[in-house]
Image (cartoon, helix red, strand yellow):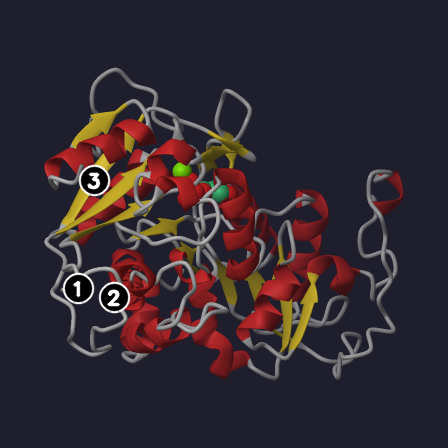
Amino acid sequence: MSSLLHLLLKQPQSLSSLNNLVSNNGAKALSIPGLLYSRRRGLHSSPPKPPSFAIAFDIDGVILRGETPIGGSPQALRRLYYDSATAATISALKIPYVFLTNGGGVPESKRAKDLARQLGVNISPLQVIQGHTPFKQLVKRFENDLIVAVGKGEPAVVMSEYGFKNVLSIDDYASFFDNIDPLAQYKKWKEIQAVKQHASLTINPDSERVGAVFVVSDSIDWSRDIQVLCDILRTGGLPGRETAHQPPLFFASDDLAYQALFPAERLGMGAFRIALESIFNSIHPKDMEYTSYGKPHPFVFKNAENVLTQVVQSAYNNIEADGGTEPFKTLYMVGDNPSIDIKGARQAGSPWFSILTRTGVFKGEGNHTEHPADLVVDTVEEAVDYILRKEHIC
Ligand code: G3P
Ligand code: MG
């Protein structure tokens, strides 16, 4: 396995380029509607000082279960805006915050719109950091290669919006190879879409090697995806051909489980990775090589801090983009998964302060034994209440 740390050491410019890329999340980082204090600040003689703290919210198991808001999340988020009565439209953000999720499957701009509808507050794409958001930093390396994008939602749209030029979802890719999935005829629930006439694709998957595979979001057909990925990986990107060097493989996260609507946790991308790796290593002489992103990597928390700085700079548009803001004194991570959210915040160290809710993966009475949080609360609403009281915000 090639670790993310190894990748970053090989690419020392990764963090800064990632920050630049993240700032282009579908909105100009310094002119985000809905984050402009200045609209309200026109009434003030002197501009308010930016807060010395900010918040990162996990989504699944903290803010939502499935599509449903939980733990008083709409009320909690409304408290982070100047005027809660107008927060559902365009208003002023009082407390800088981002969503820091290992989930994904749609572009950040679409996720921001979906979250805004579900939660009743205005949300900028800049405030949405998904597991696959860092894939943007790999555009230069694979810009013109044939890319296969795996997962629920719109994985190919996500990758194309990041700038990859020749992307096919695994659904579309598989449709180029007759009988690649021997179980396809039994999958009555599947709508088979043949896209062999894909107009914008300049590469022919029958003869062109896959340059890289990106698991963008959770696989929705493990049997087909594991079969096709084994085909791609063991043949150097030409299914049905002779064995060749494995193309690079990237996972947006490595969560073994996450909290959805069902009372017990559901298998996540990490479980899919284990299944694929185990099968691949059983049928291939060389072990599967891959890189996974997402929490709990410290790099994700460093990036969240940089994005939160951009959120402050956007909100206080009189502050110089470079060096105009004070470093945060406290960054709160509100999460439900001890081995992902809490471990990540603890590894990231100061100024991160971890808050564990009981609305998701963690449901214990006291604190988690292996990855104890700085604070345990029942819900995100309690977490926000604690933060605002501690920071003397009424
Ligand atoms: O598929 C989503 C899951 O892996 C985790 O999402 O928001 O809890 O980081 P989240
Ligand atoms: Mg979660």
**Which residue in the protein does label 3 denote?**
354
From this view, report whether residue 127 is shown above or below residue 204.
Answer: above
Residues at circles 1 and 2 in contact by the CB criterion of under 8 Å: yes
Residue 212 seen:
no
Q: Which mark is residue 47?
A: 1
Q: Position of residue 191 (x, y in %)?
A: 85, 48
Q: Secondary structure at mark 1?
A: loop
Task: Decide which of tag 3 and tag 2 comes sooner along the chain.
Answer: 2
Residue at image location 56% in from the left, 82% down from the top = 143
Q: Nearer the viewer, residue 22 or 174?
A: 22
The foreground one among 310 and 216 is 310
Quadrant in the rendering for residue 117: top right
| Residue 269 or residue 64, whichever sits in front | 64
- Lateral position of residue 126 relative to residue 241, left or right: left
> Which residue is at 36% across, 76% downward?
20
Numbered label attached to residue 316:
2
Question: Considering the numbered disc 3 on the image, is that residue within a helix, a strand or a loop?
Answer: strand
Pointer 1 local density, CA inside 10 Å: few below 14, some 14–19, many at least 20: some
Spatial CA span between label 1 and label 2 = 8 Å
Image quarter where ligand 1 lies: top left
- Residues at marks 3 and 2, CA–CA distance in whole angstroms: 26 Å
Q: Quadrant of the N terminus?
A: bottom left
